[in-house]
């Protein structure tokens, strides 16, 4: 959790932290969970990944083909 003044600053802080670790290079799509606590990305290596707000990878999903879009269900339980 990042104490922030605005949601835009929260997003920028999270993305900067992930980029700093070179984890967004090749990312095609990015989405926040409805509760704003998890970030999902798609990568050019046929994976979708979930990240916490500290920029730590919490899950990776390998696919057989290119993953170009990611979205959370309205309840945040499904990606």
Image: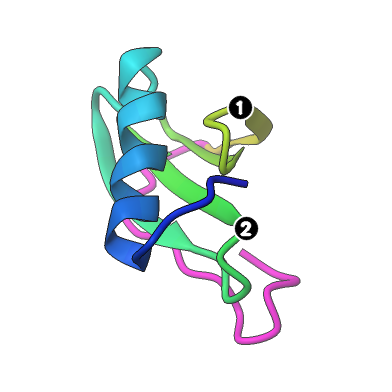
Please, which residue is most extreme toward the top here?
Answer: 21
Question: What x and y, as percent, mark residue 69?
Answer: 35, 59
Question: What x and y, as percent, mark residue 47?
Answer: 49, 34
Q: Is residue 71 magenta?
A: yes
Question: What x and y, as percent, mark residue 74?
Answer: 61, 86
Q: Is residue 74 above or below residue 26?
A: below
Q: Tell me: 67 left or right of 50.
A: left
Residue depicted at 42% across the width and 33% down the height: 46
* C-alpha span from label 2 to label 1: 12 Å
Residue depicted at 40% across the width and 13% down the height: 21
Q: 70 or 18, which is in the foreground?
A: 18
Question: What x and y, as percent, mark residue 27?
Answer: 28, 36
Q: What numbered label is drawn on residue 29? A: none
Q: Is residue 46 magenta?
A: no
Magenta residues, dominant SS class? loop
Instruction: For label 2, count other residues whose C-alpha is less than 10 Å away and answer few (under 14), some (14-19) or many (20+).
Output: few
**To which residue does mark 2 refer?**
37
Q: 2 or 54, which is in the foreground?
A: 2
> Which range of residues does the magenta coloring cover?
64-79
**To which residue does mark 1 refer?**
56
Q: Is residue 34 above or below residue 44?
A: below
Q: How is the image coloured?
A: rainbow
Residue depicted at 62% across the width and 46% down the height: 1
The C terminus, quarter of image: bottom right
Q: Earlier in the sequence, mark 2 or mark 1?
A: 2
Instruction: For label 1, count other residues whose C-alpha is less than 10 Å away and answer few (under 14), some (14-19) or many (20+).
Output: some
Q: Tell me: 76 left or right of 69.
A: right
Q: Tell me: 55 left or right of 45.
A: right
Badge 2 marks a residue whose secondary structure is loop
């Amino acid at each position: 959790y990042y104490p922030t003044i605005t949601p835009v600053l929260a997003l920028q802080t999270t993305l900067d932290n992930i980029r700093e670790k070179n984890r967004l290079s090749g990312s095609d799509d990015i989405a926040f969970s409805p509760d704003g606590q998890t970030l999902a990305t798609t990568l050019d290596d046929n994976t979708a990944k979930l990240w916490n707000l500290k920029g730590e990878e919490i899950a990776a999903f390998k696919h057989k083909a290119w993953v170009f879009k990611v979205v959370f269900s309205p309840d945040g339980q499904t990606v």
